[in-house]
């Protein structure tokens, strides 16, 4: 009778971002395979799944470790902010280390893994567990003879887990032609997550992909993820669509005469602004004015610096009469510096999004985006900036991007590559005219508002930026 | 003098070896319920004990369903598991024990082939 389609029941993982891309979590009461190379974060994902379950969803969990002892595990994840000891004491978590003697086992006939079943059943029943992690069950293949029996028994184990109605994660090491070394993905049919740790141009990025999720929608892309002091966070940035709300409110650029070029009111809130210009033409100064104006309104501004240190920027801005330091200690201005070559693009994006989520700024400034172009993966850079701009628009955050270009190059690859996603585009350039070399500023486009078509002479003075009237008045 | 010492210690070794083979075998067979596999394993080990260790073995059969805590204590994964507690070294022999030669290898009654 009812037309509503029901999705599979899901179990919230509580891992930041994972629930978004799985549309609600892992399949409840079923087994999920998490596979990847050594050091890709499988164990941690399992641990966090249990910790979040125990602390946020009141679902106790069993961690069955085939590789690490309980003490080692507790120590290893302690640095990531998970205190397993306390959860064990509260009977919300049980850690069971299954030791497999590699040398002392002799096979003399048919066997099964009932010992493992009994052990797991004991652990589950003892604390009323709803979640189970088996890390890494494939170790059994190294310790026990007869892979044929082991395969049959693992198949039986996964069915048994389903009957037990626990939501389980099984981890597996990547194989050469298969997702896992012993091909156990054949038996885990509901959900498969692949973790990856890739090096590209000497930069490493962790990525996650849902290879399979039976009976559910899920994001199909590769998502970068971070492991930091709060555990795993996955950033499903590209899942955003173009349905953000356009805001009518206008905010000042911090330079009254620039505001006047936009009909006297400045930029739209939540729009994205690109400032292109040659070296030393004053891009950072325009950005600093905007940051200052933002903080003066009592709003928060987050600036990413890719070429200067925060103290260098503040010193330089003092020389034109802007005191940015006063906004740092009240928590209105945050300056974050990172070398573009420090991480991969995905990681930069992930870190920026995370910083944005934590600081909740009204304005984000990137100074400059051109420093990424040295990565020579223009397509990916454009994709990254598009995703960031989309994200900011969606969140209603005004974005100011600075781009360094050489004279006469404006229409070429760099700017045009991203100009389509930009609402307001300002250009600063040196103009040689009548025996003078002046800085000129003009607006190439500004969506949804009337704007000046003049080239204004642009001056950096001791007391900030000033714009002269139209350049054509003196020539 | 050193020659004599050498011979003495090798005598010692021989004596110990004799004592060891005379040692009592302390065996535990862990099964899970009275399945046909369990019954087979029990029959097999009883027969092997009578044939090879008559009068010098001590066999205990334990059902893990009755005493599940032993699974973790003894680190048992596969069942049936036969554990040779004594003489040292400790050994795990898994399976229904239908392959007698392998059982004897596991019990150190046969050299590994």
Image (spheres, rainbow, N blue to C red):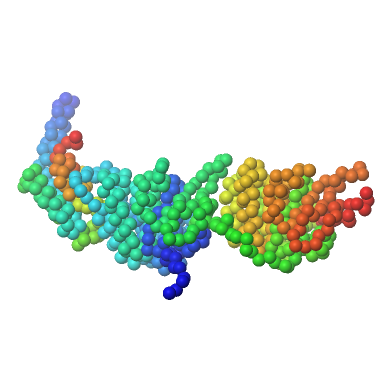
Q: Residue furthest right?
A: A474
Asked whether residue A55 appears in the rendered view, the answer is no
A2 relative to A443, above or below: below
What residue is rendered at 54% in x and 45% in y? A204
Q: Residue furthest bottom?
A: A1
What residue is rendered at 71% in x and 52% in y? A419
Rendering coords of residue A180 (x, y %): 39, 47
Q: Residue furthest front?
A: A1
Q: Residue A423 is drawn in which quadrant? A: bottom right
What residue is rendered at 26% in x and 48% in y? A149
Rendering coords of residue A446 (x, y %): 76, 58
Question: A451 or B84, which lies in front?
Answer: A451
Asked whether residue A23 appears in the rendered view, the answer is yes
Q: Quadrant of the N terminus of chain A?
A: bottom left
Question: A391 or A319, which lies in front?
Answer: A391
- Left or right for A409, reference A12: right
């Amino acid at each position: 009778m009812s037309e509503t389609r029901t999705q599979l029941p899901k179990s919230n993982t509580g891992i930041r971002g994972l629930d978004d891309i799985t549309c609600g979590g892992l399949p409840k009461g079923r087994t999920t395979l998490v596979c990847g190379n050594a050091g890709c974060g499988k164990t941690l994902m399992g641990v966090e799944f249990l910790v979040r379950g125990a602390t946020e969803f009141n679902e106790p969990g069993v961690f069955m470790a085939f590789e690490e002892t309980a003490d080692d595990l507790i120590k290893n994840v302690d640095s990531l902010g998970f205190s397993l000891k306390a959860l064990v004491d509260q009977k919300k978590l049980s850690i069971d280390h299954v030791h497999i003697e590699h040398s002392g086992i002799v096979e003399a006939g048919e066997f099964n893994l009932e010992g493992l079943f009994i052990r797991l059943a004991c652990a589950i029943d003892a604390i009323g567990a709803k979640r189970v992690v088996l890390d890494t069950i494939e170790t059994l293949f190294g310790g026990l003879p007869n892979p044929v029996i082991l395969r049959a028994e693992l198949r039986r184990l996964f069915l048994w887990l389903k009957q037990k109605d626990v939501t389980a994660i099984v981890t597996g090491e990547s194989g050469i032609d298969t997702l896992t070394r012993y091909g156990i993905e054949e038996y885990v049919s509901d959900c498969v997550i692949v973790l990856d740790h890739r090096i590209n141009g000497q930069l490493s990025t962790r990525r996650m992909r849902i290879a399979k999720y039976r009976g559910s929608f899920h994001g199909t892309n590769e998502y970068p993820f971070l492991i930091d002091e709060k555990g795993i966070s996955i950033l499903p940035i590209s899942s955003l669509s173009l349905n953000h709300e356009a805001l009518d409110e206008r905010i000042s650029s911090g330079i009254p005469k620039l505001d006047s070029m936009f009909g006297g009111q400045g930029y739209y809130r939540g729009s994205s602004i690109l400032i292109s210009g040659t070296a030393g033409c004053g891009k950072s100064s325009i950005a600093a004015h905007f940051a200052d104006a933002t903080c003066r309104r009592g709003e928060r501004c987050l600036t990413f610096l890719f070429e200067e240190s925060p103290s260098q920027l503040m010193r330089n801005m003092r020389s034109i009469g802007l005191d940015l330091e006063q906004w740092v200690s009240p928590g209105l201005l945050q300056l974050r510096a990172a070398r573009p070559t420090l991480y991969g693009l995905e990681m930069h994006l992930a870190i920026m999004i995370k910083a944005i989520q934590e600081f909740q700024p009204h304005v984000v400034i990137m100074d400059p985006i051109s420093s990424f172009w040295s990565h020579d993966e223009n397509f990916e850079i454009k994709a990254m900036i598009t995703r960031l701009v989309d994200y900011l628009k969606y969140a209603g955050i005004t974005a100011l991007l600075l781009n360094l270009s050489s004279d006469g190059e404006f229409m070429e690859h760099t700017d045009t590559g991203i100009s389509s996603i930009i609402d307001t585009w300002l250009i600063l350039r040196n103009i040689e005219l009548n025996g003078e070399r002046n800085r000129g500023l003009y607006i190439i486009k500004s969506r949804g508002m009337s704007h000046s078509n003049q080239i204004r002479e642009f001056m950096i003075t001791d007391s900030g930026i000033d714009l002269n009237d139209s350049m054509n008045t003196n020539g | 003098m050193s020659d004599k010492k050498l011979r003495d210690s090798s005598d010692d070794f021989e004596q110990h070896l004799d004592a060891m083979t005379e040692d009592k075998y302390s065996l535990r067979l862990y099964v899970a319920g009275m399945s046909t596999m369990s019954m087979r394993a029990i029959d097999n080990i009883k027969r092997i004990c009578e044939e090879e260790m008559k009068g010098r073995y001590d066999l205990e059969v334990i059902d893990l369903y009755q005493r599940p805590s032993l699974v973790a204590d003894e680190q048992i994964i596969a069942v049936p598991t036969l554990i040779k507690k004594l003489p040292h070294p400790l050994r795990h022999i898994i399976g229904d024990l239908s392959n007698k030669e392998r059982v004897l290898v596991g019990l150190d009654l046969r050299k590994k082939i």
